[in-house]
Amino acid sequence: MAELLKIRSEVEEFHKEYVYRNNQAEESRQKENQAATQIQSWFRASKVQAYLRHLHKKAIIIQTIWRGFTARACFRQMVKAAYFIMKMNFYEEMAVRIQRRWRGFFVRKYVHSFYARQSYLEGVRRKNELVRRELDEVEELQKRERDCLELVKEQTARVHQAHRLHHLLSTKQCPGVFNSPFRPAPHEMEQLLRQVKYQAPSRGMACLLGMPGPAAPSFPGTPRSPWIKTTRTLYSSRPILPPIASKRQQVRW
Amino acid sequence: MSQRQIIQVFEQYQKSRMQFVQTVADLASRPQNIDILQNAGVLSLLRPLMLDSVPSVQQTAALALGRLADHSDDLAEAVVKEDILPQLVHSLSSQNRFYKKAAAFVLRAVAKHSPELSQAVVGCGGVDALVLCLEEFDPWVKEAAAWALGYIARHNASLAQSVVDAGAVPLLVFCLREPEMAVKRIAASTLSDISKHTPELAQTVVDNGAIAHLAQMILNPDAKLKRQVFAALSQISKHSVSLAEMVIEAEILPAAVTCLRDQDEYVRKNVSTLMREVVKHTPELSQVIVNCGGMVAVIDYLGNCRGNLRLPGIMMLGYIATHSENLAMAVILSKGVPQLALCLSEEPEHHMKAAAVWSIGQIGHHTPEHAKAVATASLLPKLLELYMDASSSEDLQAKCKKALKSILQKCTYLPGLEPLLYDAPSNILKHVLCQFSKVLPHDSKARRLFVTSGGLKKVQEIQAEPGSLLQEHINAINSCFPEEIVRYYSPGYSDVLLERLETYQPA
């Protein structure tokens, strides 16, 4: 009996335990379920991640190989370009050297030619001398012309003066003012007075006398002053003037 | 009274009028009588006589009026105020040639004093009447009319424009061909007065073919005509390159160069003015003038004349040298620099000196060769002296400074630079020292000369602020010489030595 009671109490116990455990299980069922789900999800995730990792690794390998390939191709291209540029630089530098020499030569020969400048300056110098000489000649010529004109003017003035002073001519008896006995030879004015041909002093008188006016015989081509006496003697057209009343000669003293 | 007596009264009145007018005209030809005549109210008396019935009274009255107006501008203004001008202008078209000549003389006498009076003459239609007179046959009428137009056009551009608008220019060019010398002279002078104001007026004159006639007249022996012709050509060519080229293309140059040896000094002056106006435009024109020997003739001309007449020649040399260093070298070769030096020393006027200084600066600033040529003529001390002189005008000082600076920057001729070390102010001195510091490091003979001539001593005596450009140049110069020599020439070296003597103990 005791065992029955014990078994019954054990069954009771068992019931209680069962209920208790069920209750407990019921209480923590949610939690445990949750935990189980978590664990399972974690495990699934690991599986997937492991798979993805694997995939990534392989993809990366493929990509590195590809990138290496394209980079090497690019690099080869860059090398070619750099080589080309180097060559071009070299050519350009050489071309610049040639051009530099050529330009220097050209400019020195044609544009800023030293010898052309020298010859130009030499030409200017020579032209200067020439011009100076020519101008001097021209000036000299003009001066001579002017002097000549002055001389002619002076000569005509002197002849005019001689004509006015005709009365001072020296005669056989009485020497004139310009023919002083103390001189070795007569003064030039005396010579001029001898050469000058006497003329009627006023035009009114000439008209009165009916003269045809002072007619100088004009030799063809030679302009003569009308007062210079010609070698001809008095021509018949001129009336002979009445003789001057003779005065007693003054005593020469 | 009988008819004869009545007529005698009128004849007497006419005789007395004639006498009055003639006497007034004679008196008016002397300047001292003018005031007295003016106070006696001669204008109001002359005015009705100009409308007189007898032509000779009219003419003499007009002549008297013209002489009065000629002498003073008060009388000319009075003439304008009294409204005598309109009746003069009106009668210009109708009367005989003596009256026209006298009336043109009055207009000229009025117009010559000031632009306002000329404007009054233009305002009452004087210009058109004068242009009509230019078409007359009588040469003296043409001369008087052209002279009056010349005086009107002289004052300013608008008056000259009004003369041109009245159609005077073709008639004036026609007058140039007249046989009378006086008409030619006056026509040339009027053309020069018209064309001097603006390029458009000069272009109008040229378009009427004036240049060809003017060029022909250069060969004429008459001196006064040549003066006017060259003046006209220079006024035309001063405005622009194309006008100057047209003048040169008329082949005036050989004859113009010959005229530089003419007797008359104003002919020479006007030729050199013409050359200056042509040369200042472009290098090609300067080249033409240099090539035909014009420059040489101008340099000789500078030697022969004095005073203000030299100014165009000096400026011409300056303009030629400005264009290029070839031309400047040509100036130097033709012995231009000694001539300019002579001009600088002989001329007392400041503006002449300023022009000479400017020309020298233009010649010397191109290359070291040019600067050497200027320095060997010992012009640099002269320029410095003019710069430092307190009595020089502002303009002269400014030009001296500019010329000195520009020449010094290129000068490597050291003996020429040495005199400048002694008196120059610091702004000039720094250029001098700069040149020394450039040349001395490379030339040993120059260094020796520098030391023996006392230049190094002078350089040591110069005091400059440390760090300034002057001090840098001094340092550069000092570094060309050994330490002992520099110390030897430094000021107060003898005191330093004596001090050392004091402290020396013989062993």
Image: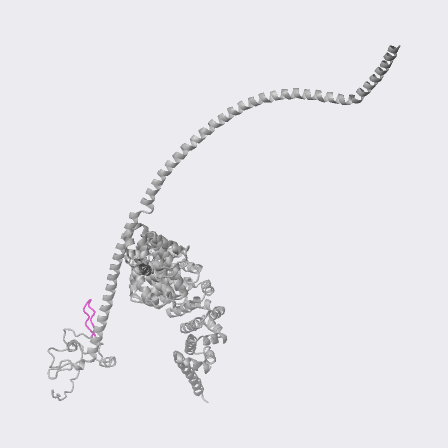
Image quadrant in which you'd find residue A47: top right
Residue B29 in sight from this viewpoint: yes
Q: Coloring scheme of the render?
A: one colour
Q: Position of residue A113 (x, y in %)?
A: 31, 47
Q: Can you say whether A61 is above or below B126 in the image?
A: above
The front one of B10 and B434 is B434
The front one of A51 and B307 is A51
Tell me, yes or no, whether the highlighted magenta stretch contains residue A222: yes
Instruction: Judge from the rendering whether residue A92 lies leftward or rightward of residue B219; answer left or right.
Output: right
Residue extent of the magenta highlight? A215-226
Image quadrant in which you'd find residue B211: bottom left
Image quadrant in which you'd find residue A124: bottom left
Q: Position of residue A41 (x, y in %)?
A: 70, 21
Q: Can you say whether B476 is above or below B306 in the image?
A: above
The front one of B149 and A83 is A83
Q: Position of residue B199 (x, y in %)?
A: 43, 59
Instruction: Judge from the rendering whether residue A61 lies leftward or rightward of residue B410; answer left or right.
Output: right
The front one of B445 and B282 is B445
**View extreme (right): residue:** A1
Total marks placed: 0
Tell me, yes or no, whether the highlighted magenta stretch contains residue B316: no
Instruction: Judge from the rendering whether residue B311 lies leftward or rightward of residue A57; answer left or right.
Output: left
Q: Residue at (15%, 87%) from the top-left corner?
A: A245
- Assign the magenta stretch its main secondary structure: loop
